[in-house]
Amino acid sequence: MKIGITCYPTYGGSGVVATELGKNLAERGDEVHFISSSLPFRLSHVAGNIFFHEVNVQSYPLFESPPYTLSLTSKMVDIAKHAGLDVLHVHYAIPHATSAVMARQILASDGISLPIITTLHGTDITLIGQDPSFAPVVTWSINQSDGVTAVSSYLRQETYDHFEVTNGIEVIPNFIDTDRFYRQDKEHFKQALCPDGEKVIVHVSNFRPVKNTKQVVEIFHRLQGDTPEVKLLLVGDGPERVPTERKARELGVFDDIRFLGKQDPIEEILSIADVFLMPSASETFGLAALEAMACGVPTVVSDVGGLPELVEDDETGYLCPVDDVDTFTDRTRALLTDAPLHQRMAAAARSRAVDAFDIGHVVPLYEQYYETVREETTAPTP
Ligand code: GMT
C-alpha cells in the first residue's frame, strides 16, 4: 500500500507514534510518504520505500504568519497525485485533519479518490481543540474523515463528550518497539551520574504546563534526606523548563538534578532509572510512561485520562490523584526502599509493555483499519 503520513516533526508523542508507525509499515513492505514541515525527529534517514516531503510555506507581506494549513493541503494534493497514495493518515487533528479533508475534496474534483484517516492524540481534543476558535473546525474535520482513531478509550469518550461527532472512532493504543526499548547494561553511565550508588528518578516530557514538571521537583525535594539518596534526571525541553529550574533552585535541590534537554536515544537513560514520574494534569495515553515500562521501570503517574488503561495500580506502578504530592512522594519512596516490591513491579511493567503494547501487535491493527476504510470508501452505495 502507498501511505501518506502527516505529523508534527518536533518532539512530542504524536510525532513519535506517527514516525514509528511509518517506519514499521515500510519494514512490512508498504511505501510510506511523510508530509511534514520538517524531517520528523525520529526519522533519522530516508531510504528505500520511505520518502519525506517538506511542506514549503510562503511568506508574503500581507500575511501576518504564513498560512501553513493551505501549504500543507497543496503538498498533500501534489504527493497524492504523483505518488498515487492509497490512503492518507494524519496525526493530531489541528490542522492536519482539516488540510487532509480539503486535499481530498480537491483531488475528488480531479476524479482521484483518497481515503483519509485522522488519529486523535491528546490536546487536539482535551484542551486546545475545545477552544471556540477551533472547535467547529475540529468537529467538521473529524466528521469528514473517512476513518478516525483515538489512542485510548478515554480519548474516544472525551471526543464524543465535547464535540458533536457522528463518526465512529476506533481505539488503537500507542505502541512500543520492545526489541529497542529494554533494560540495557549502562553501568558506566550510572556510575558516572551516581558515584555513591544513589537511586535514579526519571521524568521525560516536553515541559508544557500540563506535564506538572514543577511537581516532579517538589516530590524529589521531599525525598531528600531519605536513605538511599536519590538523583533526578529531567529529559526534554519546553516552556516550563525555566520555571522548573527556578523551583529547583528555590528548594535547594538544583545540584542533585540533571536537566538533560532533548535526548535520543531515550532507552539508554531509562535503563538506569529506578522510578519514572509522570504527575500530568491530563494525559490521553502517556507514551513516555510506556517507554519506561518497556525498560523495566515502575511508573508513578496521575490517575487521569488514559493512564489507568496503561498503568495497573499496585501491579506495574502506582496511580496517584492529580496534584497529590504527598501520595506521589509516598509511592515513589516505597519503590525506592522496598527492593522486592521494586523487582516485582519492574518485571510486571516490562511484561505489560510486551504483552499489550508491542509494536508487533499494534501496527497490524492500523493496517487492518486502513483496509477496512478503503473497502468502505470504495464500496458502491446501495
Ligand atoms: O496532545 C498533545 O498534547 C500532544 C501529543 C504529542 O504530540 O505529544 O501528546 C499526546 O499524544 C501522545 C501520543 O498519542 C500521548 O501518549 C500523550 O499522552 C498525549 N499527551 C497528552 O494528552 C497531554
Image (spheres, helix red, strand yellow):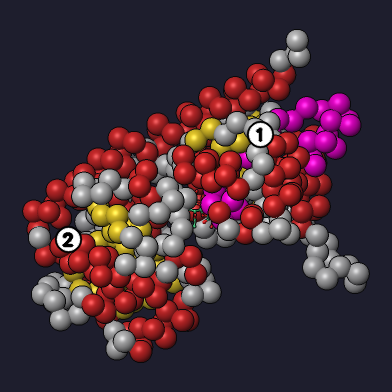
Secondary element under disc 2, as helix, strand or loop, is: helix
Residue at the spot 48% in from the left edge and 29% down from the top edge: 365
Circle 2: is it few (<14), some (14-19), or many (20+) Cα within 10 Å?
A: many
Which label belongs to residue 335? 2
54 and 261: which one is in front? 261
Count of picture labels: 2
Give the distance between the C-alpha atoms of the residues marked 1 and 2, in whole angstroms.
45 Å
Residue 208 at least partly seen: yes
Classify the position of the C terminus by image quarter. Answer: top right
267 and 52: which one is in front? 267
- Residue 17, relative to residue 214: is it above or below? above
**Residue 15 image point, x, y percent:** 55, 52
Camera-nearest label, 1 or 2: 1
Which label belongs to residue 166? 1
Splitting the image into 4 quarters, where does residue 230 fall? Answer: bottom left
Q: Which of the marked residues, 1 or 2, is nearer the chain's N terminus?
A: 1
**Mark 1 near mark 2, Cβ–Cβ under 8 Å?**
no
Looking at numbered disc 1 in the image, what kind of residue is underneath it?
Thr
Which label belongs to residue 236? none
- Magenta stretch bounds: 102-125
| Magenta highlight on residue 117 | yes
Spot the residue most to the right.
62
